[in-house]
Image (cartoon, grey):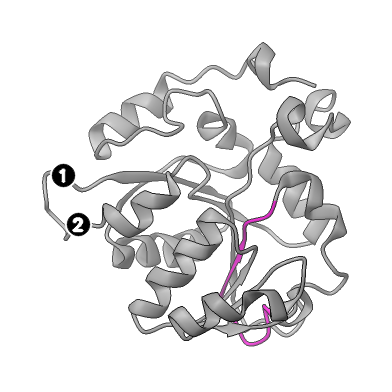
Amino acid sequence: MKIGIIGAGNIGGNLTRRLTALGHDVSVANSRGPETLTALAQETGATAVTAAEAARGAEIVVVTVPLKNVPDLPAGLLDGAAEGFAVIDTGNYYPRERDGRIDAIEDDGLTESRWTERRIGHPVIKAFNGTYAQDILDRPRPAGDPERLALPVAGDDAAAKEKVRLLIDELGFDTVDAGGIDDSWRQQPDTPVYGLREGVDAVTKALSEASPERPEGFRG
């Protein structure tokens, strides 16, 4: 499968490593230009590209950049992606630590992923936002393994969600359907499921225990 990854930080870098190891054709981009990704490209066999080129022909596009940088992504970011492509959003809103206050999230009540999809002009599937990056390399397990971790996955497009869940299964993790993007507050920072290293039952329970009230520490 052709996969484009926009953002080469901890999550983006380790997804690049795992997905290339699984045989996928990965293009990876960051905000500083492909020349800064030479080492990652040589290590993995991924193709270093500009952000504007990352989605070209891609069946799945991963957007894994700080939330504050989403509006700076190039226009036409998703032009040229394959028909029926899915977008994975791994983002989190950290108003005090990094992103500054975003009024549409705090005043209008948008989930962070709904805000992101409005910025990029395409529906997203929220996944990997509460995953420890190192677990992508260290914690894959075969299906049925009692130590297999489960990841919550939220999104409105059933076909795109299924495509993402199958990819996560291939990566060695179970998934739990966390509802639509308007329900994705259940997996935002400081919710019970955020950073949870457990299986399907525990993740399902944690999602059910989430509160829609945004904690004080995650308000601008």
Give the amino acid type for the residue marked by disc 2 in the picture: Arg
Say whether residue 146 is left or right of residue 97: left
Q: Earlier in the sequence, mark 1 or mark 2?
A: 2
The spot of residue 214 in percent (x, y) is 65, 18
The spot of residue 10 in percent (x, y) is 53, 54
Other-residue count near label 2 (Cα within 10 Å), few / some / many at <14 / 14–19 / ≥20: some
Q: Pointers 1 and 2 in contact (CB under 8 A)?
A: yes
Say whether residue 87 is left or right of residue 105: left
Q: Residue at x 48, y 49 (%)?
A: 128
Task: Give the overall secondary structure of the magenta segment.
Answer: loop
The answer to whether residue 59 is magenta is yes
Magenta segment: 54-65
Q: Residue at x 71, y 29 (%)?
A: 97
**What secondary structure is found at the residue carrying circle 2?**
loop
Residue 141: mark: 2
Which residue position holds label 1? 147
